[in-house]
Amino acid sequence: MNIKEYLQNNILLFEGAMGTYLSSLGRTYRKSPEEAVLDSPEQVAAIHREYLEAGARALKTDTFSANRLNYPESAAAIIEKACSIALKEAESYSAFVFADIGPIEFAEEKGDAATEFKWVADRFLENGVTNFLFETNSSLEGLETVAAYIKSRNPDSYIIVSFAILPDGFTRYGLFAKDLIEVVKRNVYIDSFGMNCVQGATHMKETLSKLDIGEKVISAMPNAGYPIVVGHRTRYDGDPSFFAQSVLDMARLGARILGGCCGTTPSHIRRVHELLSRQGVRVKERKRSESAGIIDRVVSPFWEKLMRGEKVIAVELDPPEIASMDRFMGGAWNLKSSGVDIITISDCPIARARMDSSLLSCKVNRELHMESLPHLTCRDRNLNATKALLLGLYAEGIRNVLLVTGDPIPTAERDEVKSVYQFNSRKLAAFVSALGQESLPSGFHIFGALNVNATNFDFQLKLAKEKIQNGMIGFLTQPVLSLEALENLKRAHEELDAFILGGMIPVVSEKNARFMDSEINGIRVSQRIIDEYRGKDRDECEKLAVEMTVHIAKEISPYVDGYYIITPFQRVSLMTQIVRNIKKL
């Protein structure tokens, strides 16, 4: 009997966790559970038997991270031995064996996950394992390609793709579970999809109840609750009976493939098996949740002006380095009075701690009744912190955000200050866009950065197009202070289907020009501009700064939807002069 035939009349129960169970028993291996198949094969075999005796009818090979990125020398040997152990143990119980394959993280970043997935799949097929469980995924990178490849080699293979979905419905890359599942449901090569890890059984049941599972078989393999740290070890103390009841409820919601992930033991699987055997499982009728009916009454004049085709003016103010807001708020008020449409507030620029850009945005919005565009970086926050911040911003009436990867932390500080970088600006854009569809009455207007000074501008355009696909609707460019930057801006205008705010920064002295050209990432100042400031005093430089910035605004005007002006050294009075002159164009 093959798996599809088995599933017509049965629920397929997988074994639980291998790695955490090995660890809880104090069993030894070199550095990872996967290497236990080489160091202690009899221990791995014994655990498989425990799960089979508990009622499991599907084994996972002990190979979750066995690929050439993690084990350059031994990946093939680990897979070969793991297959041999699992196949031998499964034979006596007429159980199925699945190749257990985890995400290939580093390959995803390089864009060649499919290549490594294919190599891993070939090793399993060579060793007689033809069913595959791709689990704990945060994206679909490489999975559709490898699924088609496996079916081309063995049409009878059964393929499950499982995602690690956080309780709020997103993966750690900020991808929306419903969007991923809609893709998988349409894929003819993937037989089943589902969830595993990161959630306990109760939360996974709640997540499952909100998903439209369609006609495909769905799997659910939750953790045994949530971990605690005792001493230097991570433990799971979830009650097997409570776990089993929630898993039974998931079967009633339509899940046909069940099992356990981190922290689950043979006791957990035994209790699930007993409940499934004792109680007939009838699938409950599922009710769709209805919208709460919240009406979004916040209007963004900045956005409406863009939509009408009118040129907008955005001015950037750096947040304070001390706990006083007086100078910042006074500057923001003066900019509002001069006719600025929105101020942008950077998020700890150059990776140095300053007052939080989002809190400042809320204060400006509430007290000055002026729109602000907070910058949000990927550098300092993980997914949970980002979502919490966005919900607060939305509640405070902020509707426009600028998403950037963020400047790297200076080398000397990396031992003391840790960056996060859980995702890049493209993935963050996809997350914010999905959040607007699922958790908010309406979405944010998402902007990004575009470096018109980049040496390889073709690559910048490629990234920008990916950002647009992920939900960005506009870009603020780096300052245009050279002919090369102007030419790149023209290309962006021609090739990008998005709003563009042309970047400008007033040069206030020869020294300032040389400093920006030499030491500020993303800014290039032409020699002609540097020469213009040679020998001039402060008043002459300020007059020239106004003239030159207004001239650049004229030059870029045909290619932009507005202007993005960066304030140098908090010289707001200089900015108000520039803004008033630009408004006369």
Image (cartoon, grey):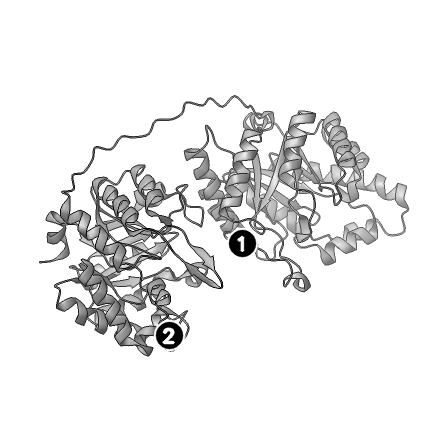
Q: Which residue is mark 2?
A: 29
178 or 460: which is nearer to us?
A: 178
Residue 542 percent coordinates (x, y): 84, 41
In the figure, 547 relative to 84: above or below? above
Residue drawn at point x = 70 percent, y = 54 percent: 520
Image quarter hosting the N terminus: bottom left
Image quarter hosting the C terminus: top right
Q: Crowding near pointer 2: few (<14 within 10 Å), some, many (20+)?
A: some
Q: Residue 165, which numbered label?
A: none
Left or right of residue 186, residue 396 in this image: right
* Residue 167 seen in the current view: yes
Disc 1 is placed on an element classified as loop
Disc 2 is placed on an element classified as loop
Amino acid, disc 2: Tyr
Residue 398 percent coordinates (x, y): 58, 31
Q: Residue 421, which numbered label?
A: 1
C-alpha separation, residue under disc 2 versus residue under disc 1 = 31 Å
Residue 183 percent coordinates (x, y): 31, 45
In the figure, 315 relative to 411: above or below? above
Q: Earlier in the sequence, mark 2 or mark 1?
A: 2
Residue 454 percent coordinates (x, y): 61, 54
* Residue 152 seen in the current view: no
Residue drawn at point x = 70 percent, y = 53 percent: 524
Q: Crowding near pointer 1: few (<14 within 10 Å), some, many (20+)?
A: some
Amino acid, disc 1: Tyr
Left or right of residue 573, residue 306 in this image: left
116 or 577: which is nearer to us?
A: 116
Q: Residue 293 is drawn in which quadrant? A: top left
Residue drawn at point x = 76 percent, y = 33 percent: 331
